[in-house]
Amino acid sequence: MGTSMGKGSQLESDSGCTLAVAIDGPAASGKSVIGREVARRLGIRFLDTGIMYRAVTWASIRKGVDPSRERELTSVAACSEIRLVTVREEDRLLLDGDDITDHLRHREVDMVVSVVSAVSGVRRALVAQQRAIAEDGPIVMCGRDIGTIVLPDACVKVFLTAAVEVRARRRTAEKAGNADYEKIMDELMRRDRIDSEREDSPLRPAKDAITIPTDNMTIEEVVQVILSKVQ
Ligand code: DC
């Protein structure tokens, strides 16, 4: 995987841990918006690993691969070239050279991404790419298994939580009145269940993660808690 995300930071670790901030949590817990802001303030790179699982899901839908065909899904993950680039300050994802960013949040991807990301072969391929990206320098990385599997030596590990009602309200607001709250809540519960009950790398906090219940917190408050841990 190539990336043009800017490198470079003054962050240094005295304790020998990986210079990384791992942010995990369920869907719509704020990982991406908070992680991006933490990275901006620290002057380091940011990677939302969820988009990589979404890219493989989109590719398998386009190739007509049935979500129950684990070997075929694994081969899609292993053979697709995913690149992250920044275009006019926006992160874009290129799959085999095509910019598929605008497709990644489509409903058809939402419907099957949890199933595709439960496949061990898919995870193996993407985790290897995520670790390689982290080796390039300091990074804030968010997902479901960053603190437990991808970067178990990250300096700071955070697990964001929020009640499903709060998360559904946030997602509904994001879609600007264009969405059904009940449907969104059902969908979040379904994805939470698959993500946390899967055998390989289930969603759970690392033993040394700080859990932040974000229900009644602003984005800025959560960012400040994380920055205080980094310092
Ligand atoms: O964060 P998101 O909603 O974009 O993630 C999409 C799916 O990808 C989610 O249902 C679980 C999966 N995922 C994962 O299994 N491991 C990660 N590190 C990131 C995402």
Image (cartoon, grey):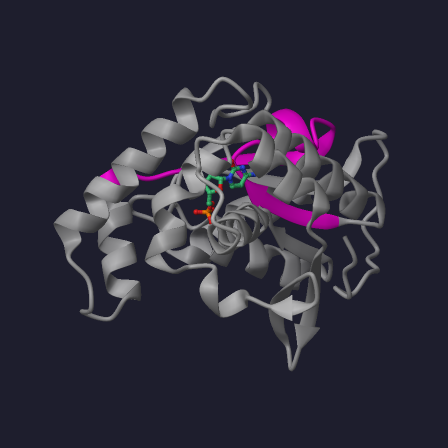
Q: Where is 113 relative to 148, above or below? A: below
Whether residue 154 can be seen here = yes
Q: Is residue 8 left or right of residue 215?
A: right
Q: Where is 92 relative to 136, above or below? A: below
Q: Of 46 and 73, which appears nearest the observer?
A: 73
Find out whether residue 169 is within the magenta segment: no
Residue that lies at the very extreme toward the bottom in this rendered image: 88
In which image quadrant can residue 198 be found? Answer: top left
**Location of residue 26 in the rendering, given as x and y in whole percent from the top left corner:** 40, 38
Q: Where is 226 relative to 159, above or below? A: below
The residue depicted at 59 percent of the width and 30 percent of the height is 71
**What is the magenta range?**
139-164
In which image quadrant can residue 70 be found? Answer: top right
Q: Of 120 and 14, which appears nearest the observer?
A: 120
Q: Of 180 and 136, which appears nearest the observer?
A: 180
Q: Which quadrant would the C terminus be assigned to in this image?
A: top right
Q: Is residue 146 left or right of residue 14?
A: left
**Location of residue 179 in the rendering, given as x and y in whole percent from the top left corner:** 19, 62
The residue depicted at 37 percent of the width and 49 percent of the height is 110
The residue depicted at 41 percent of the width and 25 percent of the height is 196
**Location of residue 35 in the rendering, given as x and y in whole percent from the top left corner:** 56, 53
The residue depicted at 15 percent of the width and 57 percent of the height is 180
**Location of residue 10 in the rendering, given as x and y in whole percent from the top left corner:** 84, 55
Q: Of 112 and 194, which appears nearest the observer?
A: 112
Q: Where is 86 relative to 81, above or below? A: below
- Looking at the rendered structure, the number of numbered marks drawn on it comes to 0
Whether residue 160 can be seen here = no
